[in-house]
Amino acid sequence: MKSHLLALSLLLPFMAFAGCTPVSSTKRNPIELSGQLVLTGSSTVAPLATEIAKRFEQQHPQVRVDVQTGGSGKGIADVRLGVADIGMASRPLASDETDLTAHRIAADGVGLIVHASNSVDELSQEQVIAIYTDKINNWKEVGGDDKEISVVHKAEGRATLEVFLKHYEIDNPSVKGDVIVGENEHAVKTVAGTKGAIGYVSIGTAEADIESGVPIRLLPLNGVAANTANVASGVFPMSRPLNLVTSGSPTELASRFIQFCQSAEVHDLVKSQYFVPVTSESDIAK
Amino acid sequence: MRSDRSLTIVTRALAAISAAIVLLIIVFLLRESTPALRQLGFSRFFTDASWHPLSDQFNLTPMIVATLVTSVGAVAIAAPLGIASAVFVNYYAPRPLAGMHRRLIELLAGIPSVVFGLWGLVVLAPIIATFGGSGQNLFTATVVLGLMVLPTVALLSDTAIAALPEEWIQGAAALGMGRSAIVGWIVLPGARRGICSGIILALTRALGETMAVLMLAGNIVEMPSSLLSPGRTLNANIALELGYASAGHRSVLFVSGLMLMLLVSMIVLFVSRREGNQA
């Protein structure tokens, strides 16, 4: 009997806490959502969607959000087949996909970076292609100092690599890199430590690092400065939207989740994945 | 008697579990790489033109070479330093210094590999970059890897040397041998087995190290022409690409893991057979 009492007294505070959470969250959301949502698609969007889903589930304990990957193509196919409630696509919808609706939740911009001491102001499309395919090997050939170019490239399959290759229309096997890196941060540290290096990274990462004093510089592209503001407004060319895709009329739960993804409540999550949150109304309308 | 029997059962069970874990890992690797092996066959991983898994090119040979170069090189750096440190601690250092030296080496063993990698990337690579290139190459990776496996050699050699029978040393001294002669003729040959197992453990640790090498080796998949050329190890390959790989690509990455497993088991088998013959 005594030991039972002891156990109960030990458990009591936990039970009190456990009882606490649902009460407070129902207060915030008088109409409680419930049910299950299935998201499939882009592996670029999936980590962000997973984070957002966690927060959504915290606010709505009756809701289960299931995030699966498999590529943008799978996301679109699954929505059409009705296997998934929401598809994830890390590209705009194609002309033969007008039966679907894209809801932009973020943008991903990729910018070229060089060492801060590099005297080159801008590189043309052809120059970048020539540098990456090993036709130009010295900065003096593009108007810089007499210094060997170290080409920093990404590992196959990385999202930034795909954006880069697609923008310059380069075939990956024809790229001759000097260093292959994984994470954006790895690319930034490599360029910061090598005076002759050029690389490309997610613009969000580069901006954060430049602010904290890392000696790198973002190169403008076609005269457009590489910064998150230009990515958000859509004028920066080497970028792509991250979309949630639905077909016909989505369920109440699905549209509430999409609204949540586009709301300012998740901007911190979007930024923590180095994506650019959607800000203006026009973006949301897209 | 009773406790003897229960101890036997417990140790047998635990030994069986640890063996089973290794077998399970091999089974898992085989199962995950079967689709790729069935579709491509084993030989394409050696005969393809390059490694571009998304463009159907799957040559693993440069990565096997890079893996061997960095780990053998790391042991070549760590072994003399580690053995010297163990001899120093046991025969040359004054007692208080020996204790401090041991603690320092133990501390070195506790530093996480990412920290080594970051230090190499931010401090060492820019220095090596003054010789040309980006400073991320097999040499940088090997040096840092050598520092990382140094404590393994040093501590195991230290234990082996300290365990030598006191009479051997006293006998040798009584015969009039000097300190360096005792170390060279009695201590090192006597502690050979312990030192060897330290080196093997260091080698397998170097083969398995991923993060620091990934950050420092440059990761270009090309047959290295010199120590200053970049290279990608099998583990770095998995770490770089697995997070973004789907179906077929994922499966060839497991083949690269299987290759690493084969490499390690071949080395272990080779060494244990040699040790067996000598014993």
Image (cartoon, rainbow, N blue to C red):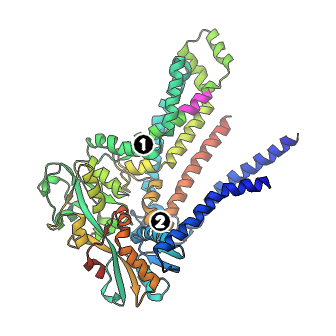
Name the foreground residue: B71 vs A12: A12
> What amino acid is labelled 1 in the image?
Phe
| Residue drawn at x 44%, y 42% as measured from the top left | B145
Query: Is residue B224 shown to the viewer in this render?
Result: yes
Q: Which mark is residue A189?
A: none
Q: Where does label 2 land, which residue? A: B44
Discs 1, 2: same chain = yes
Name the foreground residue: A17 vs B69: A17
The residue sitting at the left extreme is A143
| Residue drawn at x 35%, y 87% as measured from the top left | A97
Whether residue B155 appears in magenta in the rendering, the answer is: yes
The chain letter for the residue carrying disc 1 is: B
Residue B152 position (above or below residue A43): above
In the displayed structure image, the side of residue B134 where residue B194 appears, left or right: right
Residue density around tag 1, few if under 14, some if 14–19, many if 20 or more, within 10 Å = some
The residue sitting at the right extreme is B1
Residue B140 position (above or below residue B246): above
Percent coordinates x, y for residue A72 in the rendering: 40, 77
- Magenta stretch? B154-160
In the displayed structure image, the side of residue A154 where residue A18 appears, left or right: right
Percent coordinates x, y for residue B129 in the rendering: 28, 43
Residue density around tag 2, few if under 14, some if 14–19, many if 20 or more, within 10 Å = some
Percent coordinates x, y for residue B247 in the rendering: 49, 72
> What amino acid is labelled 2 in the image?
Arg
Q: Quadrant of the N terminus of chain B?
A: top right
Percent coordinates x, y for residue A271 in the rendering: 34, 63
Residue B135 position (above or below residue B164): below
Q: Where does label 1 land, which residue? A: B116
Using the numbered discs, state the Cα–Cα distance from disc 1 to disc 2 in whole angstroms.
35 Å
Q: Main secondary structure of the magenta part?
A: helix
Q: Secondary structure at mark 2?
A: helix
Query: Dividing the picture into quarters, in which one does residue A217 lie?
Result: bottom left
